[in-house]
Amino acid sequence: MRPLATVIALFLTTHHLSAAGDGVHLKADSFFEIAGLPITNSMITSWVVSLFIIIAIRILVGSPQLVPNKGQIIVESVVSGLRGMLEPIVGKKVFFPSFWLLSGLFIFIIIQNWSGLLPGVGTIGYGSIIDDHFSVNKPLIRPGNADINMTLALSLVANLFWVYFIVKYAGLKAIVKDWFGNKADKKEVHILMFAALSLIFIAVGFIEVLSIVFRPVSLTFRLFGNVFGGESLLHSMFYLVPQINWILPVPFYFMEVLIGLVQALVFTLLVAVYIGLICNHEEGDNH
């Protein structure tokens, strides 16, 4: 019975699965490959989260009705709150075309972030026994956003559609003017000063282009760093003081709930601001 108990404990016990020995792996663990593509524990978690979102929306809303049920009211309240936050940023012209992207990013990221707080995530796995303590070599479940590949993919998708929205709804002329155009009023400054300012704004435009190139990098590492750091912190708190290893992490759980929400908001709002900086000029001027 002892070998059977050991196998069951390896898969189901979370108390003794030691993150202190192995820590949180910086790289997601691969379980198998499909056509040469490694399938990692973070990918599986992301698929489960995506499936959960789809099923939850279908259950809550079902067939949309003119007189909404309780589930539809919940979904509509979330959509209404996101609309009130995002529409002034991106502008009315681009809001509806971009809302599916922005709302999808927010909901997906926040649930991915909070998935790392569920019992067993990052601790249930298989490994070895050392001095009657379990050492996890490969966690079966890993938060999707604790994998830099996931945050990089989110950043690249967001920036790809940013290019699509600004080209379609602002146009190349508006983009060039926004990046390299002289912002001074020709009627209010001397011609020589206007020419000097034109050179300055062209130089600033190249700096702006450079910052745009690095946007995916900043979005990637900001989200990954906060989620991975929070996951590492929680694992460390469980084994910092063994006598109170189920009490010490509790305050940090609440902190990670807040950080998960903030990071989802930051990522979504930054993408919205990037879109609105170019596509929302006319509405902002009129306002």
Image: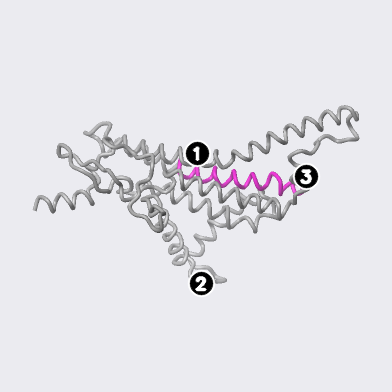
Q: Which residue is mark 2?
A: 63
Image location (x, y in percent) of residue 106: 52, 51
Number of numbered discs overlaid on the protein picture: 3
Residue 221 tag number: 1
* Nearest-to-viewer mark from 1 and 3: 1
Decide which of 92, 267 is in the foreground and name it. Answer: 267
What span is colored magenta in the figure? 259-287
Identity of the amino acid at label 2? Ser
Instruction: Please tell me whether mark 2 sits on a helix, a strand or a loop.
Output: loop
Give the main secondary structure, helix, strand or loop, of the magenta stretch.
helix
Image location (x, y in percent) of residue 212: 64, 40
Identity of the amino acid at label 3? Asp
Mark 1 or 2, nearer chain start: 2
Instruction: Please tell me whether mark 1 sits on a helix, a strand or a loop.
Output: helix
Alpha-carbon span between mark 3 and mark 2: 41 Å
Q: Which residue is mark 3?
A: 285
Dot 1 crowding, Cα within 10 Å, few <14, some 14–19, many 20+: some
Instruction: Please tell me whether mark 3 sits on a helix, a strand or a loop.
Output: helix
